[in-house]
Image: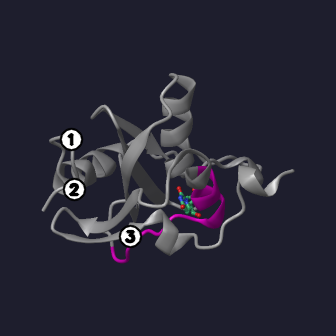
Amino acid sequence: MGASLGVSYEELIKSAFEAAENAYSPYSHFCVGAALLTSSGEIYKGCNIENSSYGATNCAERTAFFKAVSDGVRDFEAIAIVGHLEGKEAESYAYPCGICRQVMSEFCNKEFKIIVARSVSDYKVFTLEELLPESFGAENIN
Ligand code: THU
């Protein structure tokens, strides 16, 4: 099973678990990791970064996207996402929140792959179109 560009879904999921190790989540104790595969085969990792003013929290997916975009990278193939309570195994699949899906839609086409994983061998793959149908985009602004 694989993504493309010589990077397998399993590798991408492994990177997402590594990213989750850096989660700063003293309030929810929920650690999220994301690994974003660029069209040139690089992987950008991101974790959730919480704040005592809860609304200032940044999700793992957006951390990965903002790291890449701020490096001048704007072409992406796939993202793997994992989430688990501190010190525990992942129990459920960590689906991206609505804001993160909207950020993905700014930079990715409908075929962009979103992999939600509980382990390197237990995962589901969706397209962005499946998780964010009928979305609002630049074409709606006249
Ligand atoms: N979180 C993410 O990192 N990504 C999501 O898509 C959903 C939620 C984080 C935010 C917060 O630090 C914790 O999970 C609990 O909501």
Residue shown at the point (33%, 60%) measured from the top left: 87
Label 2 vs label 3: CA separation? 12 Å
Label 2 vs label 1: CA separation? 11 Å
Span of residues in magenta = 91-103
Q: Position of residue 33 (x, y in %)?
A: 40, 51
Q: Which residue is mark 1?
A: 5
- Bin the neighbour count of mark 3 within 10 Å (Cα to Cα): few under 14, some 14-19, many 20 and up: some
- In front: label 2 or label 1: 1
Amino acid type of the residue that numbered disc 1 sits on in the rendered structure = Leu
Residue ranking furthest to the right: 142
Viewer can see residue 37: yes
Q: Nearer the viewer, residue 76 or 82?
A: 76
Label 3 vs label 1: CA separation? 18 Å
Element on which disc 3 rests? strand
Quadrant containing the N terminus in the rendered view? bottom left
Q: Nearer the viewer, residue 112 or 139?
A: 139
Badges 3 and 1: C-beta atoms under 8 Å apart? Answer: no
Residue shown at the point (72%, 48%) measured from the top left: 52
Q: Which residue is mark 3?
A: 126
Q: Which mark is residue 9?
A: 2
Left or right: 136 with respect to 13?
right
Ligand 1 sits in which quadrant? bottom right
